[in-house]
Image: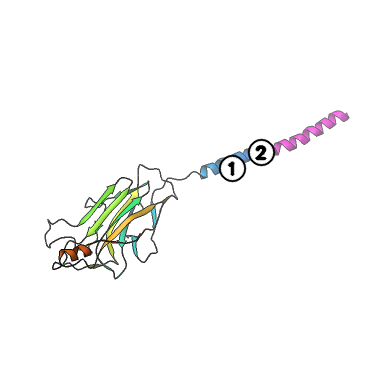
Amino acid sequence: MRNPMRKRLLSLALSSLTLPLFVDCGGGSGSHGSDIASSVPSPAKSLVYINPTSTGWALMKDPSSTPTRLVLNVVGPSGLLTRGVGFNLQASPGLVFDTFTNGLPIQDTGVYELQSAAPNPGDPVALTGALKPGNLLTVGIYQKRLEMTSKDSGKALCQIALKLDPAATVTVGHTFALVIPKAKVIPDDIGSNGDDLNTLAKKLRMQDISLTVGTLTAN
């Protein structure tokens, strides 16, 4: 009688030990699977741009921007007189430069006087833009005539636009690289029609500037 009783007690003791082990294993497996599912990055659907804090030349977000199309204004220091600005901007993969209604990747905002004579609707404006290999944008906007007065640079002088590349896989939280390899302006004093060629040659030169870019992330 003593041996069967001892075996029964031993069997009950083993059952009480193994049952929690099976329960724990089941619960752990479900929790781990949930963690894996929640850690998978979500595809990005919009762009978030934080303006730079620079008081100099900078690319600032325009109010016309939408979550899917970022419009950036080129803005200079208030009170600085210039006659034009041009720059190159290289964007990392996952972004594309969008065009405007003029078919170019740059838009005039009406600050600079771009025509050589007015009024003449057929006169081409000094506005240019193109895309180069390596996702490099090159744009420029200039006044043509020497007699035109220079303009205050502390305004939105021109615009560019960026969108997510529909052919790329971009996830939420991704930070894009935006690099300005070169940026120049046409200064206030470029000479006058009465100056000799040597004087004009010295003054008709673009000046280097530092164009600051903000932070762009995918959301």
Identify which amino acid the numbered label 1 is placed on.
Answer: Ser
Secondary structure mostly taken by the magenta-highlighted segment of the chain: helix
Separation of residues labelled 2 and 1 (CA atoms): 13 Å
Residue 209, disc: none
Q: Earlier in the sequence, mark 2 or mark 1?
A: 2
> Across the whole image, how many numbered discs are drawn on residues?
2
Position of residue 192 relative to residue 45, above or below, is: below
Q: Nearer the viewer, residue 67 or 20?
A: 67
**In x, y percent, where is residue 23?**
66, 38
Name the residue beneath numbered marker 2: 23
Report crowding for label 1: few under 14, some 14 to 19, many 20 or more residues within 10 A (C-alpha). few
Identify which amino acid the numbered label 2 is placed on.
Answer: Val
Q: Nearer the viewer, residue 103 or 35?
A: 103
Q: Residue at x 55, y 44 (%)?
A: 35
The N terminus, quarter of image: top right
Left or right: 205 as drawn, with respect to 26? left
Q: Which residues are magenta?
A: 1-22
Q: Residue at x 74, y 37 (%)?
A: 17
Element type at marker 2? helix
Name the residue beneath numbered marker 1: 31
